[in-house]
Image (cartoon, helix red, strand yellow):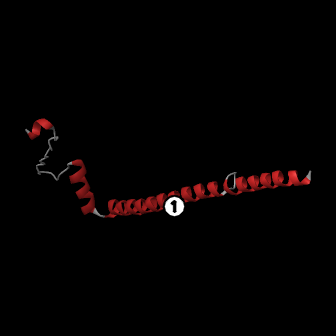
Amino acid sequence: MTSRFFPKTSCGILLYLAYTYFGGSSGLIRFWRLHQTRSALEREITTLQVRQDSLRQVIKLLEHDTTYIEKVARERYQMGKPGETIYSIVKQPKSEEAKK
C-alpha cells in the first residue's frame, strides 16, 4: 500500500510546491507582475518630477520676469502694447481640395 501511495503523494506535493512557487498570492508570476508595475510607476514618477520642475520654473518666471510675462501675453493671448497693431495669421486646414 505504501508503494502506490508514495508516488501519488510525492506528485501531489510537487504540484502544490510548483503552484506555490509560480502561482498563488506570493508566487513568481505575481512577483514579476508587481516588479513590472513598480518599474512603470517609477518611470511615471520620474516623468512627473521633471514636469513639476519645469512648471516651478515657469511659476518663478511668471512671478518675477516681466519679459517672460510679456512674451506669454503676446504669443498665447495675442495681446499688445497700447498703439500696437496685432496681426494674426490663420493657417488653412490641409485637405484634398486645397491640394488641387
Question: Where's the C terminus, which quadrant?
Answer: top left
- Expressed as whole percent of the image width and height from the top left, the position of residue 31 reads 63, 58
Q: Which corner quadrant of the image does residue 48 belong to?
A: bottom left
Task: Label 1, secondary structure: give it.
Answer: helix
Picture mark count: 1
Q: Residue at x 70, y 57 (%)?
A: 21
Q: Label 1, on which residue?
A: 42
Answer few, some or many: residues within 10 Å of disc 1's Cα (few below 14, many 20 plus, some between 14 and 19): few
Seen from the viewer's position, the closer of residues 45 and 64 is: 45
In the image, taking residue 2 as reference, residue 37 lies left or right, namely left
- Expressed as whole percent of the image width and height from the top left, the position of residue 25 reads 69, 52
> As shown in the figure, which amino acid type bears the numbered disc 1?
Glu
Q: Residue at x 62, y 55 (%)?
A: 29
Q: Is residue 92 above or below residue 23?
A: above
In the image, taking residue 59 as reference, residue 5 lies left or right, namely right
Q: Residue at x 25, y 50 (%)?
A: 76
Q: Which corner quadrant of the image does residue 56 belong to?
A: bottom left
- Expressed as whole percent of the image width and height from the top left, the position of residue 69 reads 27, 58
Q: Residue at x 76, y 52 (%)?
A: 16
Q: Residue furthest right?
A: 1
Q: Residue furthest left?
A: 100
